[in-house]
Image: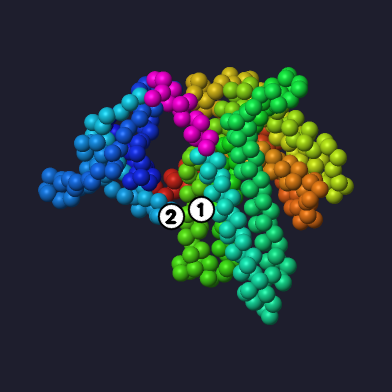
């Protein structure tokens, strides 16, 4: 195999590489296959020279067919080296069906996206805990920061976001564990058990990309807010806090950017023929239909109403696509674009996330052992705007003005002819 790999993380510890190679470029993602490559990085490499005799890189791997071009100079996560590696006739084994590389690695993507969400929730918890502790120690205007209502409100918002991210991450982990280790015959009603399995599979497929993209974006926001809570000290390298922000910034990029994952969510909607929407809404309505304390009834109604709006918009937009002849999966679309859903995919994903986190916070606060703070967190979350989309035509299928708006500033920067 001959190929330049631009982003290989932790290459020196990898015993093998999984390589995607387009065997049929005209077929888009359907032309991508998965290959297995042994690195042999246990052997010492040798420096290679360019035409002028200068050091050019390191030859590594099996019979020096793997060539380390350089290490990347990254914004953050520098403790995790990223390399640019060139394959020079490296032996490779096809380990997926030809043209089905994405399908072959889908289970791994589920796990790595869950790991990314865990890292996001952990980053939020770390900066929030540091900021709360600092507020008890730092004095301003003759009082500790924890005594200032505005600062406490800021910390409270960070805490609610952190709790929401943790619950969403744990829910995806629960669904993944149920899918991997399910024991059939645990319920007397076999039909009901099958329905639960199908529901959980749909929820796992929907929530995995949503949890990853939402927790990652919120982690960047919360960590940035937390840095600000330290004032000037948060900007100083010797405190270690700037490193937290730099490292967190990679989370929306790893394992698929926000837009890529939003489009993955769109694929889920289309491939399930909107069945996942029914499972999503039914699960929330059933979960919030049991007896709730009076303090949680209003938040429950807010989450249910918002969830209905989100599902209605998704169904409406899919019908709009069919009406303009684009109601297909992304790979099969002649234009390679889903007009209505693509323009709103990010806000739709955020809406799914906010509604489901609201459900999880209410469910957690309804336990007998819940604290008053758990109830308050559920109330605080439900009072925000949960649904960011509307089935009133707010996302047009005509993108001409979007392009005009974007390109206008570019034209202004270009010198006149």
Q: Earlier in the sequence, mark 2 or mark 1?
A: 2
Badge 1 density bin: few <14, some 14–19, many ≥20, Cα 10 Å: many
- Of 393 and 376, the residue lying toward us: 376
Q: Residue furthest right?
A: 294
Badge 2 density bin: few <14, some 14–19, many ≥20, Cα 10 Å: some
Mark 1: which secondary structure? helix
Q: Residue furthest left?
A: 52
Identify the disc placed on residue 248: 1
- Of 71 and 114, the residue lying toward us: 114
Above or below — where is 214 with respect to 130? above
Above or below — where is 364 with respect to 22? below
Rendered residue at 66%/71% (across/down): 136
Q: Which residues are magenta?
A: 95-111
Rendered residue at 22%/43% (across/down): 59
Q: Is residue 321 visible?
A: no
Identify the disc placed on residue 118: none
Task: Name the quarter where the N terminus is drawn.
Answer: top left
Rendered residue at 86%/46% (across/down): 293
Mark 2: which secondary structure? loop
Tell me whether circle 2 and circle 1 mark residues in contact (CB < 8 Å). yes
Residue at label 2?
76
User: Picture quarter containing residue 223?
Assistant: bottom right
Specify whether residue 224 is painted magenta: no
Specify whether residue 108 is painted magenta: yes
């Amino acid at each position: 195999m001959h190929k330049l790999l631009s982003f290989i993380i932790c290459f020196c510890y990898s015993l093998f590489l999984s390589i995607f190679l387009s065997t049929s470029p005209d077929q888009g993602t359907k032309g991508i296959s998965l290959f297995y490559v042994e690195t042999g990085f246990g052997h010492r490499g040798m420096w290679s020279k360019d035409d002028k005799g200068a050091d050019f890189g390191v030859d590594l791997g099996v019979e020096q067919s793997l060539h380390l071009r350089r290490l990347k100079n990254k914004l953050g996560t520098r403790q995790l080296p990223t390399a640019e590696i060139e394959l020079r006739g490296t032996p490779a084994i096809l380990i997926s069906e030809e043209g089905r590389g994405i399908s072959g690695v889908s289970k791994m993507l589920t796990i790595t996206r869950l790991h990314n969400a865990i890292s996001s929730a952990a980053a939020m918890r770390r900066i929030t805990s540091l900021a709360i502790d600092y507020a008890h120690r730092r004095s301003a205007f003759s009082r500790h920061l924890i005594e200032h209502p505005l600062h406490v409100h800021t910390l409270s918002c960070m805490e609610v976001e952190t709790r929401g991210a943790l619950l969403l991450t744990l829910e995806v982990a629960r669904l993944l564990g149920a899918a991997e280790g399910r024991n059939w015959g645990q319920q007397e009603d076999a039909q009901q058990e099958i329905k639960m399995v199908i529901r959980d599979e749909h929820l796992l497929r929907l929530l995995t990309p949503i949890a990853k993209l939402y927790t990652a974006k919120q982690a960047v926001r919360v960590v940035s807010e937390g840095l600000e809570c330290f004032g000037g000290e948060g900007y100083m390298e010797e405190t270690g806090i700037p490193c937290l922000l730099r490292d967190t910034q990679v989370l929306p990029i790893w394992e698929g950017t926000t837009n890529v994952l939003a489009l993955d969510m769109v694929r889920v909607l289309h491939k399930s023929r909107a069945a996942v929407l029914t499972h999503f809404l039914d699960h929330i309505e059933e979960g919030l239909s049991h007896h709730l304390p009076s303090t949680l009834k209003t938040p429950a109604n807010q989450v249910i109403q918002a969830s209905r709006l989100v599902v209605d918009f998704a169904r409406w937009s899919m019908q709009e696509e069919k009406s303009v002849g684009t109601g297909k999966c992304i790979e099969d679309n002649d234009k390679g674009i889903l007009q209505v859903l693509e323009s709103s995919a990010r806000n739709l994903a955020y809406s799914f996330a906010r509604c489901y986190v609201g459900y999880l916070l209410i469910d957690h606060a309804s336990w007998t052992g819940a604290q008053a703070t758990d109830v308050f967190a559920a109330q605080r979350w439900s009072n925000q705007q949960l649904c960011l989309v509307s089935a009133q035509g707010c996302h047009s299928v005509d993108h001409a003005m979007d392009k005009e708006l974007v390109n206008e500033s570019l034209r202004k920067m270009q010198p006149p002819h």
